Amino acid sequence: GANGTQGAQGLTGTQGADGTQGAQGTTGNNFTYDRTLWVDPNGNNSTAQLGRFDLPWETVASAANYLVSNSLSGHTIVVMPGSYTENTITIDSNADFTTFILHGGVTITLNNTAAFRIDEANVNIIGLSQGVVGDLSTGVTSSPFIDAIRSNQTTSNQCIFHVDSPANPARLKIENINVIHNYSGSDDSKSMFFIEDSTGSSKGLWVRIKGCMLKQQLATTAMINWKGITGASVLEVCD
């Protein structure tokens, strides 16, 4: 015979228990370091922020200039692995007691007329992974794990480190890095280290070189040149 009429729908059943909660996602960066700046080849000088490792500078010179322009002393600039081509990097008394940490595999190449300038300031430059340069004749590094500061051309360079103490003490300490100076001329102001008292009223100069490999092209200039020093000065070289 024919099917009978369909009966009414039954009542909805009781809702089941909630499932297990999933794992919490990764927490975004919400921490700001007090006195640390980061530099990375993928950074951005326009958006970089003090204390934010996720917002680094692109160049060492710009990070240093930020400290000087804002009169921030006692800060650390952490340079992450990579190759950097830089204009003059300056630290003066407005950014006293600045430390640069080259974080393994850092190569800083200074442009033709650029130098690392320390004017009346205390500056530390420390490499975390100093090694041997691959080709001493050219200063080309064969290992990605060394920390090096090198000049560019052979005839028009400035010095690599220019330390000046016109009125207040200046102190430069470099540790565990390779320094390669390609200048091959005879201008004494373009030696690897040019240390001067530009006004004749220095309160003291101290240069400390520890555990570094220094390489300079054959030239008639000294590797370390002192000029017009009238006050106390100290050069310390050690392993």
Image (tube, rainbow, N blue to C red):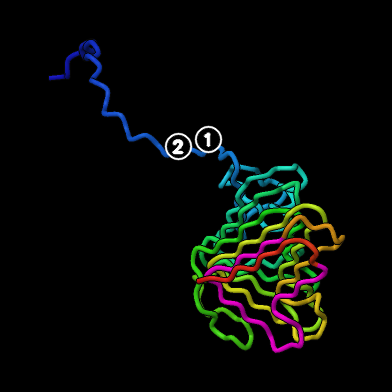
Spot occupied by residue 222 in the image (x, y as percentages of width and height): 73, 81
Spot occupied by residue 119 in the image (x, y as percentages of width and height): 77, 57
Residue sitting farthest toward the left:
1
Image: magenta residue range = 205-228
Q: How crowded is mark 1: few (under 14 residues within 10 Å), some or many (20 or more)?
A: few
Left or right? Give the position of 134 relative to 230: left
- Three-letter residue code for mark 2: Thr
Residue 18 counted in the magenta span:
no
SS for dot 1? loop
Quarter of the image with the N terminus is top left
Q: In which quarter of the image is residue 181?
A: bottom right
How far separated are the C-alphas under marks 2 and 1? 8 Å
- Three-letter residue code for mark 1: Asn
231 and 103: which is toward the camera = 231
Residue at mark 2: 27
Spot occupied by residue 49 in the image (x, y as percentages of width and height): 65, 43
Residue sitting farthest toward the right:
199
Left or right? Give the position of 229 relative to 192: right
Contact check, label 2 and label 1, Cβ < 8 Å? yes
Left or right? Give the position of 18 relative to 66: left
Q: In which quarter of the image is residue 188?
A: bottom right
SS for dot 2? loop
Residue 163's place in the image compared with 151, above or below, is above
Residue 227 counted in the magenta span:
yes
Residue 94's place in the image compared with 106, above or below, is above
Spot occupied by residue 216 in the image (x, y as percentages of width and height): 67, 82
Left or right? Give the position of 97 relative to 16: right
Residue 181's place in the image compared with 49, above or below, is below
216 and 226: which is toward the camera = 226
Q: Residue sitting at 79 percent across and 85 percent down?
A: 185
Q: In which quarter of the image is residue 16?
A: top left
Residue at mark 1: 30
